[in-house]
Image (spheres, rainbow, N blue to C red):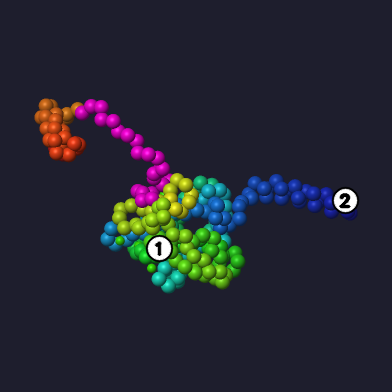
Amino acid sequence: MWKKVLFTAIIGLFVILLFGSTTARAAGCDPNNIIFSEIDYDQPGTDNNEFLELRIINAVSISNCEIRLINGSNNATYDTIDLTGNWGPNQYLLIGSTNIANRDLTFGGGACASNCLQNGAPDGFALVDTSTGTGTVVWFYSYEGTITEYDAGDGTLVDSTPLTNNGTAVNDTGDESVVNGPATGVDDCVDGNPTPGTANQDLSGTPTAIILADIAASNGLSNAVIIALLVGFSALLFLGFWLRRRTNH
Ligand SMILES: [Ca+2]
Ligand SMILES: [Ca+2]
Ligand SMILES: [Ca+2]
Ligand SMILES: [Ca+2]
């Protein structure tokens, strides 16, 4: 009898080790595996193309996590986006308005088309662990300033980490988005071309030098003469020159 029980236990343990280990994932809401990647909260005119992009570093279950959008003027949560499923590694989780293609989740309970992300200043967003039953801040970022003493539900007052670029608060007002830099630190945000759901523009390197070795006029001697005149004229006035691209070629 005892031999049979012991044999069954050993087989059960073997099955757990064999199959359990292959599906093991990091704990949910792991701040090292769910990081902020990019946000575009303000476009010229009406904000029709807002999105928030997260990057999943390693395989992780995020079913106990949610993203909360937080109004900096009163610390109220104005939108909650439940996260679910197993993700990663190296995947982008895209939350967007209904105008954002290939989004995984949608602001406003699935219905928000414009003005989904408040424009500050400041406003913020937090990754919250809900496995505690009430809510615990995992990370909490803000833009255009700092939000103080936000309570996710567990009674702990948390100040946001402002998105900055070398200490200067970022301000998204144009065609670009706020991209977390190549380093994972949030004090390394830069303006970049919006890349919802895909790898961010790499702005880490020094711009590649362009050496102008030759100018080929597309329209015979006339273009070359124009360029020569421009160069000579500019050198006299500004000690520099510019190139003009003809539009009628
Ligand atoms: Ca706008
Ligand atoms: Ca606000
Ligand atoms: Ca907005
Ligand atoms: Ca991106």
Identify the disc placed on residue 145.
1
Identity of the residue drawn at 53% across and 48% down = 57
Front position in the image: 186 or 178: 186
Q: In the image, residue 66 lies at what x, y percent? A: 51, 62
Identify the disc placed on residue 3.
2
Does 73 appear above or below 14?
below
Identity of the residue drawn at 43% across and 46% down = 199
Numbered range of the magenta stretch: 190-215
Which quarter of the rendered picture does the C terminus lie within? top left
Left or right: where 7 falls relative to 158: right
Front position in the image: 82 or 140: 140
Does 89 appear above or below 143?
above
Ligand 2 image position (quadrant): bottom left
Q: In the image, residue 93 lies at what x, y percent? A: 47, 53
Identity of the residue drawn at 30% across and 53% down = 175
Decide whether the magenta segment is chiefly helix, strand or loop.
Answer: loop
Front position in the image: 101 or 141: 141
Residue type, numbered disc 1: Gly
Q: Quick check: is 193 in the magenta stretch?
A: yes
